[in-house]
């Protein structure tokens, strides 16, 4: 069996019309809940219904509400004290407070059919949000990721109509990072009919609560695994506890869906980052595609960090790639 069939059977079964994307099944799973219930009550109901959903039971609600509606209610309630990502700012975004990502309403900087993603994904209808949960000092999209007020806000229904008109293989939610816009994305899907696989293209710095909400929504996680330790994550992306959070979320993602992992090799970070990441993938995740990327360029504030203020040397890239090959990983060519 080739790598694509082994790593992405669910994704291809949707493309071939043998399965429907998970969010369609969520919309068919009827549930009963009262949107005015407490946050804890809503979580309890979500846990209860998700057990049934994952066990293949049919929903039995009689109020005309479905499991995606429950996820939307929960996600919007999470904005009262935002903990969508592990920065856990606890600001009330519903009353206009901004946290570290600076995102309030969802703003889209661009959307288009992307032909530059992994070949199995193209054409990919890619929706770029402004703002990010990370502050990477070398960010190539810093004009978008670090300026949450750039771009434009659209009603969820408008984006759903754009999705329904696209001839794409999937919807690719990205930024910056999509995490700050999780409630908005769910609302778009509530209006979306087209049975396209949903791709979560992210730094994976989500909380466990956000991961639980994405369970049953996302078909493929397209992850950006940057650092092989928390010290580099703190220094270069201002992200605390990077390693613990990102490895935890990759394991959760694998339980929920299929995964394509991207790793951008950075100058002078092969031993501290590339090799530990590849070793960890080899030891902990089965049947995931791994894309080892060579396109690092020193940008944004990289000049303040001498070891990355230079292009990647070809030998460094080859060293990372050969390490991956020696581990027998499924590499994206
Ligand atoms: S999504 Fe933004 S406001 Fe919410 S916890 Fe993360 S950084 Fe803070």
Image (cartoon, rainbow, N blue to C red):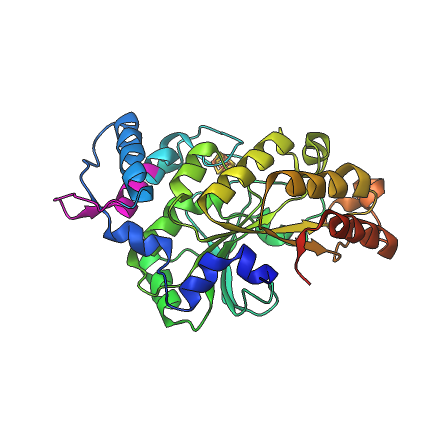
Residue 152 percent across, percent down from the top left = 45, 57
Q: Residue furthest front?
A: 1
Q: Quadrant of the N terminus?
A: bottom right
Residue 113 percent across, percent down from the top left = 51, 69
Q: For the point 58% across and 44% down, which residue is it?
A: 203
Q: Does the magenta stretch include residue 67?
A: yes
Examine the rendered structure and indicate whether residue 223 appears above or below residue 20: above
In this rendered view, identify the residue nearer to me: 51 or 244.
51
Examine the rendered structure and indicate whether residue 168 appears above or below residue 73: below
Residue 121 percent across, percent down from the top left = 54, 64
Left or right? Give the position of 9 relative to 213.
Answer: right
* Magenta span: 57-74
Could you tell me if residue 103 is visible in this image?
A: no
Left or right? Give the position of 272 relative to 153.
Answer: right
Examine the rendered structure and indicate whether residue 92 appears above or below residue 298: above
Q: Quadrant of the C terminus?
A: bottom right
Q: For the point 63% across and 54% down, which residue is it?
A: 141
Could you tell me if residue 290 is visible in this image?
A: yes
Left or right? Give the position of 117 relative to 99.
Answer: right
Q: For the point 27% across and 52% down, which residue is it?
A: 27
Q: For the point 37% across and 46% down, which residue is it?
A: 216
């Amino acid at each position: 069996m080739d790598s694509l069939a082994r790593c992405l059977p669910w994704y291809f079964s949707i493309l071939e019309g043998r399965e429907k994307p998970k969010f369609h099944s969520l919309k068919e799973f009827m549930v009963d809940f009262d949107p005015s219930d407490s946050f804890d009550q809503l979580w309890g109901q979500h846990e209860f219904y998700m057990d049934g959903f994952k066990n293949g039971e049919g929903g039995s609600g009689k109020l005309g509400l479905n499991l995606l509606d429950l996820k939307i209610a929960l996600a919007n309630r999470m904005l009262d004290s935002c903990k969508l990502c592990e920065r856990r700012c606890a600001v009330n975004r519903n009353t206009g407070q901004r946290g570290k990502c600076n995102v309030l309403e969802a703003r889209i900087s661009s959307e288009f059919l992307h032909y530059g993603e992994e070949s199995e994904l193209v054409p990919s209808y890619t929706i770029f949000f402004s703002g990010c949960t990370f502050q990477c000092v070398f960010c190539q999209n810093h004009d978008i990721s670090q300026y949450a007020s750039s771009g434009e806000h659209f009603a969820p229904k408008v984006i759903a109509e754009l999705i329904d008109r696209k001839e794409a293989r999937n919807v690719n939610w990205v930024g910056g990072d999509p995490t700050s816009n999780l409630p908005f994305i769910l609302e778009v899907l509530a209006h979306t009919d087209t049975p396209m696989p949903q791709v979560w293209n992210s730094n994976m710095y989500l909380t466990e609560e956000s991961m639980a909400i994405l369970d049953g929504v996302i078909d493929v996680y397209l992850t950006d695994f940057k650092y092989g330790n928390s010290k580099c994550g703190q220094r270069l992306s201002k992200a605390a506890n990077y390693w613990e959070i990102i490895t935890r979320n990759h394991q959760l993602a694998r339980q929920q869906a299929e995964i394509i992992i991207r790793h951008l090799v950075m100058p002078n970070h092969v031993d501290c980052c590339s090799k530990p990441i590849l070793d960890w993938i080899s030891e902990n995740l089965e049947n995931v595609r791994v894309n080892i990327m060579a396109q690092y360029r020193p940008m944004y504030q990289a000049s303040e960090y001498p070891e990355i203020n230079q292009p990647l040397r070809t030998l460094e890239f080859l060293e990372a790639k050969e390490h991956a090959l020696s581990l027998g990983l499924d590499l994206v060519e």
